[in-house]
Each structure stands twice: as C-alpha cells, then as structure tokens.
Image (cartoon, coloured by chain):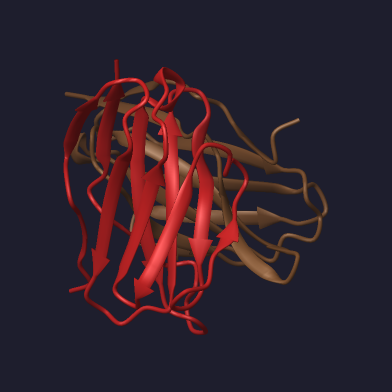
Chain colours: A brown, B red
C-alpha cells in the first residue's frame, strides 16, 4: 500500500466550478500535511499547509481528518490558471529524520 | 527569493556512463534532497543531506551516490547509468527548524539513458 494515495484524475471542470481532491495517508504517526502544486514540466511548489482545524487561503480550503487519515483540498470558482497537478504531501519522522512523502498527484484541467 | 539551480535541464547519456547532476542553492539551507519523479510513482527520495559531508539514504538509493562538500552544493552521481534511471531528477533544499515543509525545488533535470 502506498504511504500517500491520491486519485490521479484528471478532473475536468469548467471555469467557475468547485472541485475537491482527496488524499489518504497510511502512517498514523505523520506529523504535518501539505498541498503542493506542480505545473506541467515544472517543479513542485508549496500551495498551502493543512491544519487540524481546517484552513483557507482565498479560493482554496484544506481539511485534515486525523482519525480517518484523510486530507482534502477544495478549490472554489476555478480559474484556467488552476490547471495543474496537485500533490498531497505528508511529513513523517523516520529514524530521527523528518522527510516529506509525496502522493502521485491529482491532475486538474479547467476549461473555458 | 530562494533559488535552487540544477546544472542541466536535459541530459542524454549512454548505458554505463558515469553521470553527475549538480544542484546549488543560494539561501544557506542546511538540508538538501535528491528525488526522482516518474509517471504513476510520484516523487521518490533518493538521498538527502542535513549538513556538509553528511548524507542519508532515502527510499531508493540503489545505483546512486551523493556528495556534499560545500553547504550550497549537493551532487547526485550515477556511477554506471542504466536505462531504468531514465527519469526526471529534482533537487530541493530547506532550512533546519522553521517551516521544514517548505522545500524549494530546482527546475529539474530530465535524464535519458540510452
């Protein structure tokens, strides 16, 4: 079983739509959680952290459910520029070192 | 702005060649990482380093080695390249303490081994 699992998509949505991505992680000792964004043929960049109480950054809302080991990202009012791959990332301490474990990503295509 | 640079964007090598991938960061970060990214497999950690001359194996170190002689530079070495090492290689850095999750990535090197 993969440590971080995501639906690869693609999710095809029209501009203005609301879309949600989910992610599950297997290591209950995971300490912190993030969403990264990766544009086609570019490097990943941090989109936002995910806090236990849920957090919002403009049109983006992230939620964490530790009991179910589940993370979500909601994008409201989708823009063409939101088209990208969204990586679910978990920070896990392993043999004394913290490391990031990346999901394989969910691809989003926003069309006019 | 943090800048992480990688020596090549595209590289074509032959099986058995020794390959060096260089990564330089300009923010005095202690921690540096090498990943490879393959379709369907995501980013996988090859090696990381938390200080000069220190290195730790990641999840897939076989066939690779690394060198960290200076704080700003982290090199990935393929001693004898093989076709299954054809991939996108990404270097990243982050500082110790603070927001470790904010890994800053280089633009990547697409390596093709023939």
Q: In this view, does B76 lie above or below B63?
A: below
Pinpoint residue A52: horizontal percent, then vertical percent: 66, 66
Identity of the residue drawn at 26% across and 79% down: B27
Position of B112 with respect to A75 (left or right) is left
The C terminus of chain B lies in quadrant: top left
Is the N terminus of chain B in the top left, top right, bottom left or bottom right quadrant? bottom left
> In which image quadrant can residue A83 be found?
top left
Q: Residue at x 66, y 69 (%)?
A: A97
In the image, residue A63 sits, relative to residue B89, either above or below, namely below
The reply, left or right, for residue B78 in relation to residue B10 is right
Quick one: B55 or A32, which is closer to the camera?
Answer: B55
Figure quadrant of residue B52: bottom left
Q: Where is residue B48 in the image (x, y as percent from the top left)?
A: 51, 60
Image mark count: 0
- Residue plotted at (48% across, 78% down): B51
Say if residue A76 shows up in the picture: no
Residue visible at 29% across and 74% down in the picture = B72
Nearer to me, A67 or B12: B12
Which x, y percent locates residue B6? 21, 53
């Amino acid at each position: 079983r993969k440590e971080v699992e995501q639906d690869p998509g693609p999710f095809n949505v029209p501009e203005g739509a609301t879309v949600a991505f989910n992610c599950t992680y297997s290591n209950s000792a995971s300490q912190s959680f993030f969403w990264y964004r990766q544009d086609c043929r570019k490097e990943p960049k941090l989109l936002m952290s995910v806090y236990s109480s849920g957090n919002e950054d403009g049109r983006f809302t992230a939620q964490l459910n530790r009991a179910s080991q589940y993370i979500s990202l909601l994008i409201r009012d989708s823009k063409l520029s939101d088209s990208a791959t969204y990586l679910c990332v978990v920070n896990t301490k392993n043999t004394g070192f913290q490391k990031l474990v990346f999901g394989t990503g969910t691809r989003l295509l926003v069309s006019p | 702005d943090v800048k992480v640079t990688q020596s090549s964007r595209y590289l074509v090598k032959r099986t058995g060649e020794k390959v060096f991938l260089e990564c330089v960061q300009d923010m005095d970060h202690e921690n540096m990482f090498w990943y490879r990214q393959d379709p369907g497999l995501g980013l996988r950690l090859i090696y990381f380093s938390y200080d000069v001359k220190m290195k730790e194996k990641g999840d897939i170190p076989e066939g690779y080695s690394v060198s960290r002689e200076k704080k700003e530079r982290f090199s990935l070495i393929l001693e004898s390249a093989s076709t299954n090492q054809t991939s996108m290689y990404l270097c990243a850095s982050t500082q110790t303490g603070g927001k470790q999750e904010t890994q800053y990535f280089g633009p990547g090197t697409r390596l093709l081994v023939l």
